[in-house]
Image: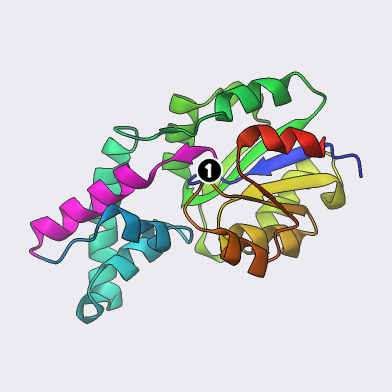
Amino acid sequence: MSFKGIIFDLDGTLLDTIEDIADSMNRVLSENKLPTHDTEAYRLFVGSGIRNLVKVALPESHRDEQTVDSFFKTMYTFYRDHCVNKTKPYEGIIDLLNNLASRDLKLAILSNKADEMTQQTAKALLPAEYFNIISGLTDEALKKPNPQKALQMSKEMGIDPEEMIYVGDTDVDMQTATNAGMYAVGVLWGFRGEKELRANGAQKLISHPSELLGLL
């Protein structure tokens, strides 16, 4: 198969965002005298959007819709202002993107992070001009693993889904790729592990960004 385009997840795939996410949520919890979590715990909380992260980070006694909504608004505001404090591209990502940009490929970013922060972090820390489309979450109904936005990207770029590589680090990403009929590549430097990626449809696992070039 000759691939013509690549869709990347953002958090845990292109950018290591976990410390800023953990710091932001822990500050909100601490200010409300609720238990915080270590940074590693947030690796399991991320992947399904900020609102879901807020819900699972709260004690079970605080997970009613009204409380979640209130904490979500506070977390969103704080994280928006601090989302590039410690966040950085993973080793090898910039070199990979430079290489891909020199080829006849179309690139996109699809994230379950709120679109405002997706745009902010991608444009601050990555060569955003390389991407044909950068898109975060604007509608909970379209959240990954719903394949609709991935398929829309494919259509906008004029590429058949089976000619697309989808690169991500979680079960949600592999499910999205599978649901969209795209080639699912799981990265082992992100927030989850090999077992989860394989169980959810990864067709290829890579340990370093440069390994993606082998598929091209």
The residue drawn where x is 25% and y is 73% is 66
Q: What type of secondary structure mainly makes up the magenta span? A: helix
- Residue 118 percent location from the top left of the image: 47, 40
Q: How many numbered marks appear?
A: 1
Left or right? Give the position of 35 relative to 78. Answer: left
Residue 182 in sight here: yes
Extreme-right residue of the structure: 1
Residue 157 in sight here: no
The residue drawn where x is 31% and y is 44% is 19
Closest to the observer, 150 or 70: 150
- Residue 64 percent location from the top left of the image: 27, 78
Q: Quadrant of the N terminus?
A: top right
The residue drawn where x is 20% and y is 81% is 61
- Residue 168 percent location from the top left of the image: 60, 50
Extreme-bottom residue of the structure: 61
Left or right? Give the position of 168 relative to 49. Answer: right
Q: Mark 1, residues whose alpha carbon is within 10 Å: few (<14), some, or many (≥20)?
A: many
Q: What stretch is highlighted in magenta?
A: 13-33
- Residue 74 percent location from the top left of the image: 22, 54
The residue drawn where x is 18% and y is 61% is 36
Residue 110 lies, with reference to residue 210, above or below; the image says below
Q: Quadrant of the C terminus?
A: top right
Residue 32 in the magenta stretch? The answer is: yes
Residue 38 in the magenta stretch? The answer is: no
- Please state which amino acid type lies under the numbered disc 1: Leu
Check the image and tell me how it is coloured. Answer: rainbow
Q: Which type of secondary structure does the marked residue at label 1 adopt?
A: loop
Where, by quadrant of the figure, is residue 196 drawn? bottom right
Residue 46 lies, with reference to residue 20, above or below; the image says below
Left or right? Give the position of 145 relative to 215. Answer: left
Residue 196 lies, with reference to residue 156, above or below; the image says below
Q: What residue is shown with label 1?
A: 10
